[in-house]
Amino acid sequence: MVIYNYLKRAKDHVKSRYKIITIKRKVFIILTTLVLIISLLSFLLLQVTFKVYDSQLINNSSEILNIYSTNIENELRKVENLSFDVLASNQTQEYLNTINSTDSSYERYDAIVRMEGILRNEAQTERYISSISLVDINGNMYTVGNSTTTIETDVQKEVMKRVDRKSGGIVWMEPQGETKNFISARKIRSIKNLEVMGTLIIRIDGDSLVNWVSSMSPQYKANLIILSENKKMIYKDRKITSEKAIGLGLNTVSSKIYNIDGKKFLLNHEVSDYSNWTYIYFLSYENIFKNIRIMRTVMVGCFLIILVLAIFMGLGFAKSITKPIIILSKKMKKVENGNFEISSIDKILDDKCDEVGQLNNDFIVMINKINDLIKENYVKQILIKETELKALQSQINPHFLYNTLDSINWIAKANNQDKIFLMVKSLANLLRTSISNKDNIIKIDDEMKLLNDYITIQKIRYEERLDFSDLVEEDIKNCYILKMTLQPLVENSIKYGLERLTGVCKITVKSQKQKDFLEIIVSDNGIGMSKEFLNKLKLGENETNSTGIGIKNINERIKLFFGQEYGLSVKSELNVGTTVILRIPYESR
């Protein structure tokens, strides 16, 4: 009864505490609890799965390791089939008969060459075949393959002795000396009368054979010992140096874990029915479970990452639910204090379509209607004032300025003020062209006339200090160019060249025709620009009081109208001068 009352009080306390916490914390607690429960259940299920997998892997280790013996036996059968194909071939029978019975040196030589060709083709069928040798009835040996090292006489005699005992069957012989090549040999008999015609000897590289078999199942890499039928060493992995390992292999009849030289190995022993070879596998116990341990670590890490992400996502989700309500509450407090303005921050909920968003929209509609009623008369008065101002501004138009310049022009001409006449006339032309809202693209001829008006004004100002040359070819003046392109470039040459140069500033505008585009080059002999200043000029970051269009803007206008392959390039060197190359399409309309 006491315990029941204690639990009831604890439950009531939790409920009361839960009621007073904010919605944001409630949502966060619920999400975090769900994620923790799911993560723990998943982790426990994964642990059970790993344990079942471990048990199954140990119980079936013999079958897994038998893959090696099966694959090796399959390769040995390939070698046996290869030897049978050679001895049963009509060409082999014909060439051997010629080699054994013909005295003619040419016919015998030709038969030997052809026979070696057959053997060479067979030697290349498998990567682990080191060489194939043929011994005729006279004891002459012919060897082809990757390793043509002559077989020692003692080894050859031992091979012949074992082959004779087999009476035509295949013989497997362990490696001799330092080499790891073991031998497969068999007699070649005549198909007609079964007389012995020679002996076929195939040398096999044990390392290459085992590596080839291992590549078929790299996830179960094992150290291997192979013993022949008479318990001679056919193959031994280089890593196995312990005599204890070999002794255990000979005496083990089932899968079992042994401690060898301080390391645990899963050892398996098997005798082949095909070759009567003994296969001894030493599979590293640690390597078997290495991937499982890594997987466990990865999974634990993933669960921790998921938990952290869930916490942050829970906070974000809770915030996304409670934030609109908090914002709406703040709006209401502003209205309560007499502030009926809806700022950009207040409009953050306008794009929401849920219940809170709908409530916010209704609130904004209400505030807007109140604002309309409050400000109606005030806004009307403002609109009236703006209308009157625009009416006054519209009375002043560019024609007034053109007419004024024209009047000054004729007064100067009447008083024989030629320089004033030329300057005002040129200025009027420049102003009329720059303000005109007609086509942005004009003929090069018209652009050059505009440039000449500008040069006329500058020559009167700078007199002999300005030397301008117009070398634009006549046959391209019907092509088109962006309006007000060349004048800003020449203006830059005057600003950064002539104004800072003590002598005469030579400015040249010339043209070059290419295959499908034009280049108009503006060059001067001014003081030039540093690399830093030139980069700023290209980016439009330099401070300038020029009223013209900047290099950056001109370049962007050209690319916008004609394409990205066109535009400006600027070259400049201090105390040498500046060259601007304008590339535009070569086209006329």
Image (cartoon, helix red, strand yellow):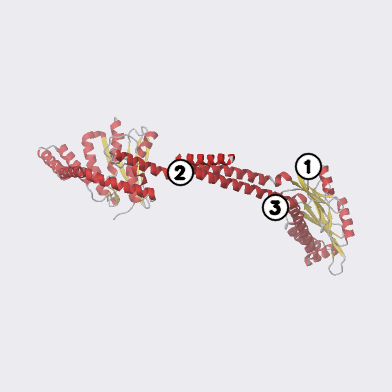
In three-dimensional space, the C-alpha distance between marks 2 and 1, rounded to whole angstroms, equals: 57 Å
Find residue 318 and name its label.
Answer: 2
Question: Where does residue 512 sit, x and y in percent of width and height?
Answer: 34, 47
On residue 259, which mark appears? 1
Left or right for 218, reference 349: right
Do labels 1 and 3 touch, CB within 8 Å? no
Q: Amino acid at mark 2?
A: Ala
Whether residue 110 is visible here, answered yes or no, is no
Q: What is the x, y in percent for residue 91?
A: 78, 66
- Point out which mark residue 516 bears: none
**Looking at the image, which residue is at 68% across and 48% down?**
51
Mark 2 vs mark 1: which is more N-terminal?
1
- Where 536 falls versus 248 (above or below)? above
Which amino acid, mark 1?
Asn
The extreme bottom residue here reads 192
User: Viewed as shown, does residue 161 lie left or right of 497?
Assistant: right
**Which secondary structure lies at badge 1?**
strand
Q: Is residue 402 left or right of residue 68?
A: left
Q: Residue furthest left?
A: 414
User: Can you give x and y, in whole percent of width and height, for residue 518 in the image?
Assistant: 34, 49
Disc 3 and disc 2 in contact, CB within 8 angstroms: no
> Residue 217: which numbered mark, if any?
3
Task: Name which residue lies at 15% across and 41% down.
Answer: 405
Residue 551 at what x, y percent from top left? Answer: 33, 41
Q: Secondary structure at mark 3?
A: loop
Residue 15 vs residue 537, the one in the foreground: 15
Q: Quadrant of residue 164?
A: bottom right
